[in-house]
Amino acid sequence: MTSAHQTRPPAFAPMAELSRALRTGETSSVILTRECLRRIAAHDAVFKSFLAVYEEEALAAAALADEELRAGHDRGPLHGIPLALKDLVDIQGKPTTAGSPLLSANIAQQDAAIVRRIADAGGVIVGKTHMVQFALGAWGTNTHMDTPRNPAGRATDTLVAGGSSSGSAVAVAARLVPWAIGSDTGGSVRVPAAFCGIVGFKPTIDALPREGVYALSESLDSVGLIASSVQDARLCFEALVGAPASGPDARRRIGVLEADELAPLAPAVARCHTQNLQRLEQAGFSLVPFRFPASLAAFKEPTNAIMIAEGAWVNDRFLDDPDAPMDPSVRSRLLAARATTAVQYLQAQATASRWQQAFAGEMDRLGLSAIAMPVTAMTAPRLDDVDHNVAPVHFTRPVNLLALCAISLPAGEDDDARPIGLQLVGRAGGDHALLGVAAEAAAALHPSRIPPQEVRNA
């Protein structure tokens, strides 16, 4: 079709629909990209999700995507679809700040491996998003750069977005881009997805490449995906890593936590979790009591020993200058890491290895396809109510220590319209199988989600 027949797509169209429209000529990558740029210009002064917008480069990439599609060169379902990157991913010639002004002159010498994969898939990067400094924090705040505002909740609320992939989650939740790249070390994709009412997929470590991504913890980091739906997340993952080698996991047995492990839940989250398990059971899933190799509380010490020690190794050069622009909550945690001994670090690694084996054995013994559990114990608090002495990762950090994959699904809202997520946890290397289970689970949950007022009819 000619451009005269091309139209601006619906603001909330699924990515498969966008991909189809690109191939039929109903729209173009340039039109999609201009629409994202328009929405960012119109709304991001409120949401503060983007650190940098690459308008010229994005429009050039979109024009190339259109030219290739017209010539019959189809790179796959991401071809011509815009996205955003968390600002710890290298783009050649652009700064990678990792959420810190201390790295404002850190110009990338080459593209990260994930950027090369996105380019090979025909994706159009429109910019980089804000994040928690050095990715060390799960509330989504940043004192020295910007703190993205969660689009969810009531219009009078100023809710945290969750972190550390705060900007990426907000950009998707506010419908500024169809999808985004984040990272997850203890919940940094899943927590903001749950708080913002969207989908956050943490693949198995190295399922998506980490080369050229600023590290927090080499042992725990994963590159992850943020999207509006499981279908969109699945489309993105398969476009970047390939389709599954085998058919879907036919087992419909899901492990569920016993009551004592759910004690930290706020009442609204507890009610929602109970209702969601009932919906899964009504949809034909068998729910099986499951226990992790240790109590969820026991995961805090070994996870912190590994994450903070490795994070301090990466960022220790900044700690001796008391005037350096560093968030107090980040500085205090990194300084505390200097007290972690080599013995403690190695003990934590040994514990992780032992628990990984025990988890896999229990999944096999019970014949489970996934574990269903909360993402966070509470809904997103107001910015002024955040307590940086605690972190909302009680239910997410075990996934990283055990080197598993997991996904956060929108699963309801509390009485203040604050989203609640359901987490599904899969086996190490079982990413495709988990996405298949998640697609079935999402269909059973069918939560209602009202788009943010600021962008509903923009």
Image (cartoon, rainbow, N blue to C red):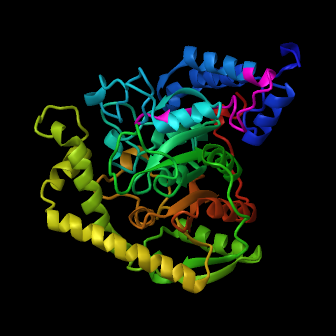
Q: Nearer the viewer, residue 13 or 454?
A: 13
Q: Give how far across and how far down residue 232 sits, in percent.
A: 68, 46
Residue 66 drawn above or below residue 129: above
Q: Quadrant of the C terminus?
A: top right
Residue at left offset 63%, top offset 39%: 452
Residue 413, can we see it? no
Residue 2 drawn above or below residue 344: above
Residue at left offset 34%, top offset 57%: 219
Secondary structure that dominates the magenta span: loop
Q: Nearer the viewer, residue 118 or 328?
A: 118
Which stretch appears magenta? 68-88
Q: Give how far across and how far down residue 4 sits, in percent.
A: 87, 13
Q: How many numbered tags mark residues here?
A: 0
Residue 100 drawn above or below residue 356: above
Side (left or right) of 355 relative to 270: left
Side (left or right) of 174 relative to 311: right
Residue at left offset 49%, top offset 81%: 361
Q: Quadrant of residue 342?
A: bottom left
Q: Quadrant of the N terminus?
A: top right
Q: Nearer the viewer, residue 110 or 152?
A: 110
Q: Quadrant of residue 320?
A: top left
Q: Give how far across and how far down residue 94 sits, in percent.
A: 41, 22
Look at the image and say whether residue 74 sits in the magenta stretch.
yes
Residue 105, can we see it? yes
Q: Give how far across and how far down residue 129 sits, in percent.
A: 47, 33
